[in-house]
């Protein structure tokens, strides 16, 4: 079946602009995760959804970052007033259930803030 | 903060040789997962090993887990050029769900 998809694959924006990154998880996966990966580093956790609710948003760096999953499937990561330090690859993953299960990752969105 | 640490940071081997990389972590885990990443994009899941398991195999991959030393190793046997990638270990803590990744090991397989 189809894997996790993310759009856009690349996003270039200017400092101060608003961006939305979309994630379409594997059908039937109830858990959805967002991670951020900077160059030369491993992914870092941002937020976790179980169904429609954000079960853990402790990884969001500040209040400029927000994510939703209104129908328990597609999720959107929203970044307001982007800064150059937000430049990274944003990865989405989904899993069946949550705790301790294998996570399937999408190809990521490379965000560049000029 | 990152819980896992891979060693070495980089590894260069000849095609056909074996590649071994290690991962150390700090706190008790539910499971440990190894991922491969090509060209800095999507991660491909390789193996999940649970805290009550000591060894798992998948094709040319062998993973060991030593919870007393809080460490894991990934062995790739008979390496191929297509194995060139970055390899990450990720831990899932007990009573948790998110993954904590290390900085990865970059493996280059020379033809």
Image: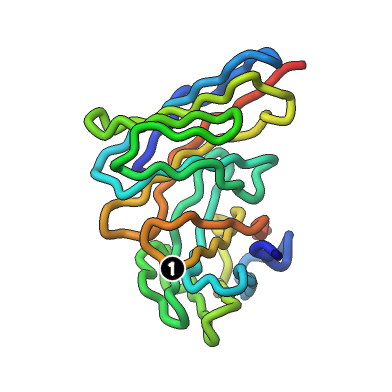
Q: How many labels sit on residues?
A: 1
Q: Quadrant of the N terminus of chain A?
A: bottom right
Check the image and name the residue furthest to the right. Answer: B111
Percent of width and height locating residue A63: 42, 73
Residue A29 to residue B51: above or below: below
Q: What's the residue at 61%, 26% (across, down)?
A: B107
Chain identity of mark 1: A
Q: In terms of image quadrants, where is residue A80? A: bottom right
In this rendering, is residue B98 above or below A78? above
Residue A111 appears anywhere in the view: no
Q: Where is residue A86 in the image (x, y as percent from the top left)?
A: 55, 59
Relative horizontal placement of residue A103, taking residue B42 as reference (left or right): left
Label 1 crowding class (10 Å Cα cut-off): few <14, some 14-19, many 20+?
some
Circle 1 SS class: loop
- Whether residue B29 appears in this view of the structure is yes
Observer-nearest of A28 and A44 = A28
Q: Nearer the viewer, residue B25 or A28?
A: A28
Q: Which residue sits at x=51%, y=58%?
A: A35
Residue A76: percent from left, percent from top: 58, 76
Task: Tell which residue pokes out farthest to the bottom in this image.
Answer: A71
Of residues A107 and B32, the one drawn nearer to the viewer in this rendering: B32
The residue at 64%/64% (across/down) is A4
Q: Quadrant of the C terminus of chain A?
A: bottom right
Residue drawn at the location 51% of the way across and 80% of the way down: A68
Position of residue A95 measured from the top left corner of the image (x, y, whole percent): 50, 63
Q: Which residue, given by chain and number where applicable, does mark 1 sit on? A: A97
Q: Within the image, what quadrant is residue B110 found in?
A: top right
Which colour assignment does the render follow? rainbow
- Name which quarter of the figure residue B12 lies in: top right
């Amino acid at each position: 079946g189809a894997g996790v998809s993310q759009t856009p694959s690349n996003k270039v924006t200017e400092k101060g602009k608003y961006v939305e990154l979309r994630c379409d998880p594997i059908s039937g996966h109830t858990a959805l995760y967002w991670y951020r990966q900077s160059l030369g580093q491993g992914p870092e956790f941002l937020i976790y959804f179980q169904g429609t609710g954000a079960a853990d948003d402790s990884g969001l760096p500040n209040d400029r970052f927000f994510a939703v999953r209104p129908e328990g499937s597609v999720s959107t990561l929203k970044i307001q007033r982007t800064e150059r330090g937000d430049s990274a690859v944003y990865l989405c993953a989904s899993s069946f259930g949550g705790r301790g299960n294998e996570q399937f990752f999408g190809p990521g969105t490379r965000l560049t803030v000029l | 903060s990152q819980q896992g640490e891979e060693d070495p940071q980089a590894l260069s081997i000849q095609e056909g040789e074996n590649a071994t990389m290690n991962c150390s972590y700090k706190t008790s885990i539910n499971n440990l997962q190894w991922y491969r990443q090509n060209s800095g994009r999507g991660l491909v899941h390789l193996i999940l090993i649970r805290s009550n398991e000591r060894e798992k195999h998948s094709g040319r991959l062998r993973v060991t887990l030593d919870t007393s030393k809080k460490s894991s190793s990934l062995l790739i046997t008979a390496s191929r050029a297509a194995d060139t990638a970055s390899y990450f270990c990720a831990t899932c803590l007990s009573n948790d769900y998110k993954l904590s990744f290390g900085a990865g090991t970059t493996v280059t397989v020379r033809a």
